[in-house]
Image (cartoon, rainbow, N blue to C red):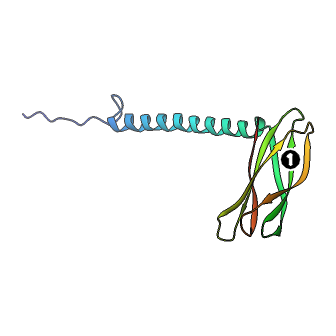
Amino acid sequence: MSAVREQLPDGRYGRSADQRADRTLRVVGAVLGVLFLGLMGWFGWYYVVDNKISAEMIKFDVVSDGEVQVHLEVRKDADVTGVCTLRSRAEDGAEVGRKDVRLDDAVERIDRVYSIRTTAKATSAELVGCTAQ
């Protein structure tokens, strides 16, 4: 008589190699997902809480071929000093003017118009950013 070999059912005597690989991939994916969420939370916390100066450009006005006026509103703690950078661009996108505005006033809100001298006719102005010092 010949011995007939029976095939054992899958999963009866431990996990197959495919099941172990699937579980490993799930664990790695979960760990990477948690790290990503932690990183996004840290960036959000830094942006909302640690940002000492908040500024907004209300409007700009091209006064002449050599000047742009920018209406800037800044909110900060009274004891914080810093710098905001304003930039003006021509129609082709080239930068034609830049100005760093010092924020030394011991107030919480600054609402002021600043003039940027330009090297050519500007068509736009923008707030590049603010940094606390």
Image quarter of residue 15: top left
Quadrant where the N terminus is found in the figure: top left
Q: Is residue 121 above or below residue 11?
A: below
Side of 41 where 51 appears, left or right: right
Q: Is residue 11 above or below residue 102?
A: above
Query: Could you tell me the amino acid type at mark 1?
Result: Val
Total numbered labels: 1
Judge by depth and name the residue closer to the eye, 34 or 97.
97
Element under disc 1? strand
10 Å neighbourhood of mark 1: few (<14), some, or many (≥20)?
Answer: some
Residue that label 1 marks:
74
- The quarter holding residue 79 reads top right
Quadrant containing the C terminus is top right
**Residue at point 90%, 35% (across, down):** 78
Please tell me which residue is depicted at 72% across the width and 68% down the height of the picture.
120
Question: x, y (%) of residue 10?
Answer: 33, 37
Query: Taking 94 as reference, is 6 left or right?
Result: left
Q: Residue at 82%, 48% (x, y): give it.
A: 55
101 versus 26 height, above or below: below
Front-most of residues 10 and 88: 88
Q: Is residue 59 left or right of residue 30?
A: right
Instruction: Choose top left, top right, bottom left or bottom right for residue 102.
Output: top right
- Residue 35 lies, in percent from the top left, at 57, 34
Residue at x-position 78% and y-position 70%:
65
